[in-house]
């Protein structure tokens, strides 16, 4: 996130904000002294393409940041529609945080014109945390050469220079790279990408039907995430106590993020989690809550 | 290294350079747009306290960077003597790269007045790479509040704010933190710090006596590192071929770094390596080279 805004903005960055992580990207942009404006909406609403269009029409911006899948709210912004708007502005670079989506949901980086698409490996890749993966476009690399250098660590042209020699500019987290390599073999050769995406879709469907039956869903209809569901706590249960019971069975769900604590709770259905894990978890919750 | 210079310099930084990594610290300082000068000497010579004094006397600097143990040259700079000079300038912060020394050699951070002492865990800690550890002084934290903020990722006051809650500002490399915790138990409770330091000293003694007998040592006398020895290839052996032979026995040494390739080679004697490993390696090299 920091590499995108420090390497890719010459004029001004537009930070699209509807959750904790998109808000953080705005903070990262500001703290690095990169000129930016924020387009901020309610956290249960999706960023719509026409909102983005309205801002880009001003001609003030040369970069946009979007968190595709907000882990804090279980909301999936309409990536393709927003991408189609950004494409109309050839000087505007498009940075997408796909932390909790990449490897779980199809993202056609080149087709969508995404200049940086980044993710942590601890979400849909199902790996130990410690490294970030990102695609970087040629035009972002070119832009980076034109902006004032702000960092050695986050210097994309420098990273690329070493990458061409199959090297890294500093000693990386080697064990995580080996783990990623092994997992990529599994994803691409054993499970298959399309099967993986279909499994995520199916798990989302199961959890969201269940959530509508017993509770309600936090984000507006049509923008529910395929990788985690944020459920409105309409029954006023104690999420903390529910988690304590679940812990006895060696599973757990997430409480709501920040101010959404106890008002919502989140069920992850991503990574190597299987459909039967989801069925089992939901049945266990029904039993504990006597639903 | 980047966090030190971006958080800790208001006026100008003095980068002490006598090897590849101290040279990199200067590059990092420059690339971040932090005002700096370099004091650069031959790589086989140690930075002496009076050289530092002469620069600090100008009153131009409010920070100094020193690589205590240059992994590229096997040279250990006289940390205590330099620290005693820096101490006379209360406004000058002292940043020490102890990447290949910490946990192998005693470094009394508070006594020496070191404001940041940093290390990777893949050297003397004997752990998988992926995290950096660093001590940060209260006056560095205070200085950081006074400089223009340049980063979210490397923001020391922000890191400290989360640290007080036993948290991290972003998802860290969790498996490495667990590994570090386990290894610290071993170092502090099983081996004992003083025993660990003594073992490093003993291994250095063995390797350096051997090196003087059959070759010569690259750094000037009295400044040989306690954790790795950089040997002058006075016999004109092929280091590459030696390493190929060693690889058949599942061990290896390092070729010289950068321009010192084939002119020198390096034997590491750090981390969990034991005295008998060193004896074994040296005997094997003698056999291969028919010494």
Image (cartoon, coloured by chain):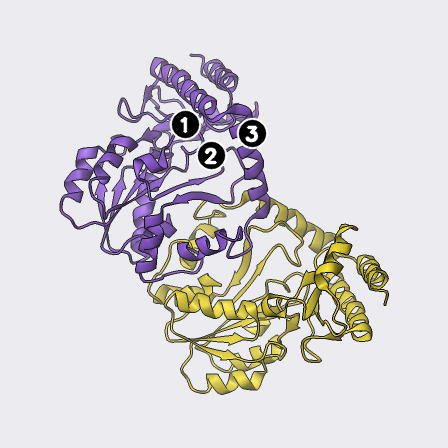
Chain colours: A yellow, B purple
Q: Which of B173 and B155 is in front in this view?
A: B155
Q: On what subunit does the disc labeled 2 rest?
A: B
Q: Which chain carries label 3?
A: B
Please say if the residues under marks 1 and 2 sit with CB atoms less than 8 Å apart. Answer: yes
Residue bearing mark 3: B186
In the image, A94 versus B168, the foreground residue is B168
Quadrant containing the C terminus of chain B in the rendered view: top left
- For label 1, the residue is B227
Distance, label 2 to label 3, CA atoms, is 16 Å
Residue occupied by mark 2: B123
Look at 69% across and 74% down and name the residue there: A224
On what subunit does the disc labeled 1 rest? B
Real-space Cα separation, disc 1 to disc 2, in angstroms: 9 Å
A89 above or below B21? below
Disc 2 packing (10 Å; few <14; some 14–19; many ≥20): many
Image vertical order of residue A291 relative to residue B270, above or below: below
Rendering coords of residue A125 (x, y %):
65, 56
Q: Which of marks 2 and 3 is nearer the N terminus?
A: 2
């Amino acid at each position: 996130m920091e590499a995108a805004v420090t390497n890719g903005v010459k004029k001004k960055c537009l930070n699209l904000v509807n959750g904790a992580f998109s808000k953080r990207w705005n903070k990262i942009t500001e703290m690095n002294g990169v000129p930016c404006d924020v387009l901020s909406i309610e956290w249960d609403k999706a960023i719509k393409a026409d909102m983005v269009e309205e801002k880009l029409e001003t001609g003030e911006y040369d970069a946009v940041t979007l968190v595709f899948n907000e882990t804090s709210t279980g909301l999936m912004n309409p990536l393709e529609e927003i991408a189609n708007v950004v494409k109309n502005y050839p000087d505007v670079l498009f940075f997408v945080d796909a932390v909790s989506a990449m490897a779980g949901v199809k993202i056609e980086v080149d087709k969508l014109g995404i200049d940086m698409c980044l993710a942590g490996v601890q979400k849909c890749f199902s790996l130990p945390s410690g490294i970030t993966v990102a695609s970087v476009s040629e035009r972002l690399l070119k832009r980076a050469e034109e902006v004032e250098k702000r960092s050695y660590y986050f210097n994309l042209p420098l990273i690329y220079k070493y990458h061409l020699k199959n090297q890294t500019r500093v000693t990386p987290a080697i064990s995580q790279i080996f783990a990623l390599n092994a997992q990529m073999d599994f994803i691409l050769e054993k499970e298959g990408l399309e099967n993986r995406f279909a499994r995520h879709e199916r798990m989302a469907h199961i959890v969201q039907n269940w959530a509508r039956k017993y509770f309600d869903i936090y984000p507006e209809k049509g923008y529910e995430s395929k990788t985690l569901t944020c459920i409105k706590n309409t029954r006023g249960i104690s999420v903390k106590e529910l988690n304590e019971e679940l812990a006895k069975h060696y599973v757990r769900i997430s409480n709501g993020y920040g101010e959404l604590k106890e008002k919502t709770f989140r069920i992850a259905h991503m990574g190597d989690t299987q459909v039967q894990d989801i069925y089992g978890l939901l049945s266990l919750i029904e039993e504990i809550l006597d639903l």
